[in-house]
Amino acid sequence: MRRPIMICVICMAFVLLTGCWDRRETNDLAIITGVALDKNKEGQIELTAEIHSPGESGNGGGGKEGENNNQGGVQSAVLQIGKGSSISEAIENLSEKLPREILWSHAEAIVISKAFAETGISDELDFFVRHPEPRLRSYVFISDGKAKEILTLRPSLERSVSEALIKLAESEVLMKATLFDLMEMLKEEKGAIVLPMIDKLPPEEGQLPSEPIAYMHHSAVLKQGKMIGSINDQITRGVLWFRNEINESIVTVEPDEAEGIISMNLLKGRTDLVPEIDDQSLKMTVKIVTIDDVIQNQSSWDLKRLDKLKALEKELVQKIEERLTDTLDIVQKEMKVDIIGFGEEFRRRHPKKWKNIKGDWDEKFPTVQVDFDIDARVLRAGKGSET
């Protein structure tokens, strides 16, 4: 009896030890680390892929199609372009130019040109969501010029352009959005999206054209998947305040009596939006609590005195309210697009009443009355002595 049992166990072991039948060797793969999307004069999509090929020496140069893009030798980065009437066709064209199988699971950044975004991005990004390999946590950016020009840059501190872009996004100084965030915003009824914009600094004296760094500036505003405009850095930080996403902020005030400036760094900030609906009249109370440290005092105020510290807190409240009011003037009154989350709060807090106004939200949003309730505290006045 034992013999048949042992034979069965051995046979089962052979079945379980069949190995990795679908294993793919890294040296046989073209690993996509970044993607740039442009449209050419013929209306075709140009997909530029930043490819890391394991086993290469990484001593190429330049940034042209099909050439290595990092002279530093830290990492082999090759750019290759595929063209087509859709993302899928462009990728098929790209595959024809590569001797290796494409792997999408390491794609970290998707850069879309402004010209592309103005024609609409919803349908084309559908590929990156439906395909099983691309990461939904990949960061999405809008470039001021051609997107592929961003990928030709050679960062001095990071191994690749896409890695440098990820570091910029994760710094949380301005806006950031992943592919998952973007698709969630596209699903929302208002269809309002705000994405970080990137550009390249002009080369300094003695630098090669590919040596400038990419930097974030402004934010792109999209409605129903199409870019309709942009907002500057200050307005972007105001949007982050409204959305309770502010993590980095330095506020500088110049009180009339202080004869100089005082700068404060945000330690903690929280925003709560409290919506009210009264006979079709819409009101939003913006409640903010912020705790800051003084990081520079060039004024005549002695911040060790309680009265001066309280006066500074009032100045801080006024400055934050001014910034948020400026944001409303642009976003609510001028652009008339809800990228600050008012509609979502009305839907969440008043779901039954929201059903009656959501169809007219584009017209209702500019009419929402906004009140501010800001509690600003200065935790530490700094280590400096009296000025």
Image (cartoon, rainbow, N blue to C red):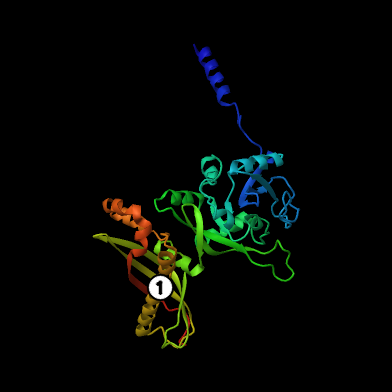
Does residue 307 appear to the left or right of 78 in the view shown? left
Q: Decide which of 271, 42 is in the foreground and name it.
A: 42
Snapshot quadrant of residue 240: bottom left
Residue that lies at the very extreme toward the top in this rendered image: 1
Residue that lies at the very extreme toward the left in this rendered image: 279
The residue lying at 61 percent from left, 50 percent from top is 35
Residue type at mark 1: give it: Ile
How many numbered circles are shown? 1
Q: Position of residue 157 (x, y in %)?
A: 65, 61
Q: State the residue position of label 1.
A: 320
Q: Position of residue 55 (x, y in %)?
A: 72, 45
Residue that lies at the very extreme toward the front in this rendered image: 42
In the rendered view, would you say 336 is above or below 252?
above
The residue lying at 59 percent from left, 43 percent from top is 86
Does residue 224 appear to the left or right of 38 in the view shown? left
Q: Position of residue 151 (x, y in %)?
A: 65, 55
Disc 1 secondary structure class? helix
Q: Decide which of 214, 76 is in the foreground and name it.
A: 214
Q: Position of residue 213 (x, y in %)?
A: 64, 63
The residue lying at 67 percent from left, 62 percent from top is 156
Q: Is residue 172 visible?
A: no
Q: Decide which of 188, 374 is in the foreground and name it.
A: 188
Q: Is residue 342 visible?
A: yes
The residue lying at 54 percent from left, 59 percent from top is 169
